[in-house]
Image (cartoon, rainbow, N blue to C red):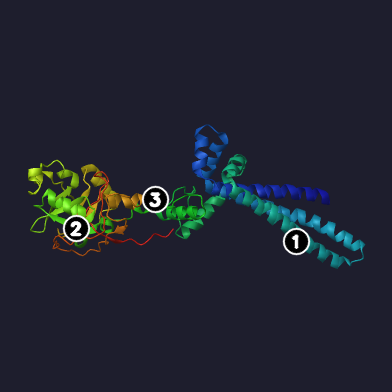
């Protein structure tokens, strides 16, 4: 074969190798979320690309077959031509034929390998990875046509490959997964934030992803940190407690240690002045819903929404009350700290996670802390009576 014809074939084979490499990486890297809207709007290339992505195993077999054939032909067709073109001038310069052949072989191998690796592998790979969606739309249609032409071969090769996987106790897949686990989503948010692609300065995205992992025991206010009022407290007592703590909701505790419900400061505003120092009527007391410490925060939020309750009693398996959950604590796990003008001081705290210990309710009305929180936003964004330990800052 003429050397120049062989060089022309080298260019064609490099282009073919680049096509199969680019198609392989494009099908693997393209995002369904970007291709599907185009396919739904009638884009034929997008529809073909989706079919290729749904049969990725066959498409990869087709690409690998094409890459292998092109690589072998490059070695067997182009290398001899380059070898001859290099060795011939050396013999005219007086270099012995054996030495010229050796030098020509090495130079031909270097040139062909360089062209193959750079233009047949790396350049198309980088293009497909950089613009995967566009590359898939461009390369998928001809790749699907070629796969139909050689379907018996690639089906057989794919069957052999899948059999080898099953021998290794690995279940083969025909489609690349387009879903992510919670941990993968958290990693994506962290990396996107670090690169400046996503703004998550307040941790709202991270908090939303971590929301379903938290339990009521992680967020509740333990009973030994809960500020309560006696069940026979008067509106005057409630007013003084609000002034001391900055809270606007207080859990009521009876003499036997049980929790009757909670009062919001606005619940006593309509009480006449002559009854201002008398015990607050029990009809004004709001009820507490009951939750287990192992209930997820997400489920707790749903319960509070259904019952319109903003404070929940956390009950251990033995029936003892071990803490109180405020709606605001749940919301802050989701969206970050909620500012409130009624707080005595702006200080972010969290409850002590419940580890399974059952604590009897033995806490009487504790000395009012000078700062604290345990708020719930359901009652006009007010604060509730609780004190919590400082929360360590989250890593960003």
Taking the image as shown, residue 259 lies to the left or right of residue 384, namely left
Give the mark toward the camera: 3 or 1: 3
Q: CA distance from mark 3 to mark 1?
A: 54 Å
**Are the residues tagged 3 and 1 within 8 Å (C-beta)?**
no
The x and y percentages for residue 374 are 25, 54
The x and y percentages for residue 370 are 24, 60
Residue 349 figure quarter: bottom left
Q: Is residue 82 visible?
A: yes
Q: Which residue is mark 1?
A: 110
How packed mark 2 is, by other alpha carbons closer than 10 Å (few <14, some 14-19, many 20 or more), is many
Pick whichever, 315 or 238, lies toward us: 238
* Numbered label tally: 3
Pick whichever, 158 or 357, lies toward us: 357
Q: Which residue is mark 2?
A: 227
Residue at figure coordinates x 41%, y 50% from the top left: 205
Residue 204 marker: 3
């Amino acid at each position: 074969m003429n050397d120049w014809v062989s060089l022309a074939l080298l260019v064609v084979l490099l282009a073919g190798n680049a096509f199969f490499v680019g198609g392989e990486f494009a099908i693997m890297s393209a995002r369904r979320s970007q291709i599907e809207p185009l396919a739904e709007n009638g884009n034929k290339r997008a529809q073909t690309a989706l079919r290729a992505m749904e049969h990725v195993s066959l498409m990869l077999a087709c690409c690998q077959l094409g890459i292998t054939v092109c690589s072998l032909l490059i070695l067997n067709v182009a290398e001899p031509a380059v070898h001859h073109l290099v060795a011939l001038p050396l013999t005219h310069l007086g270099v012995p034929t054996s030495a010229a052949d050796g030098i020509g072989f090495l130079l031909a191998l270097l040139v062909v390998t360089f062209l193959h690796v750079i233009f047949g592998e790396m350049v198309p790979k980088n293009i497909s990875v950089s613009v995967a969606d566009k590359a898939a739309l461009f390369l998928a249609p001809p790749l699907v046509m070629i796969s139909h032409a050689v379907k018996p071969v690639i089906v057989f090769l794919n069957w052999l490959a899948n059999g080898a996987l099953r021998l290794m106790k690995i279940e083969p897949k025909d489609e690349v997964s387009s879903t992510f686990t919670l941990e993968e989503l958290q990693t994506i948010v962290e990396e996107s934030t670090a690169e400046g692609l996503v703004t998550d300065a307040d941790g709202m995205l991270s908090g939303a992803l971590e929301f379903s992992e938290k339990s009521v025991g992680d967020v509740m206010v333990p009973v030994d940190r809960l500020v309560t009022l006696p069940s026979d407290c008067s509106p005057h007592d409630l007013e003084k407690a609000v002034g001391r703590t900055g809270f606007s909701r207080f859990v009521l505790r009876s003499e036997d240690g049980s929790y009757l419900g909670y009062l919001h400061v606005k619940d006593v505003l309509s009480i006449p002045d002559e009854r201002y120092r008398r015990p607050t009527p029990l009809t004004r007391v709001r009820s507490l819903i009951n939750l287990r410490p192992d209930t997820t925060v997400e489920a707790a939020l749903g319960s509070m929404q259904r019952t319109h309750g903003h404070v929940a009693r956390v009950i251990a398996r033995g029936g003892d009350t071990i803490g109180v959950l405020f709606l605001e604590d749940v919301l802050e796990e989701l969206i970050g700290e909620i500012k409130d003008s009624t707080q005595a001081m702006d200080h972010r705290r969290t409850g002590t996670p419940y580890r399974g210990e059952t604590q009897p309710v033995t806490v009487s009305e504790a000395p009012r802390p000078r700062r604290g929180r345990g708020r719930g936003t359901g009652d006009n964004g007010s604060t509730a009576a609780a004190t919590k330990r400082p929360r360590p800052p989250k890593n960003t």
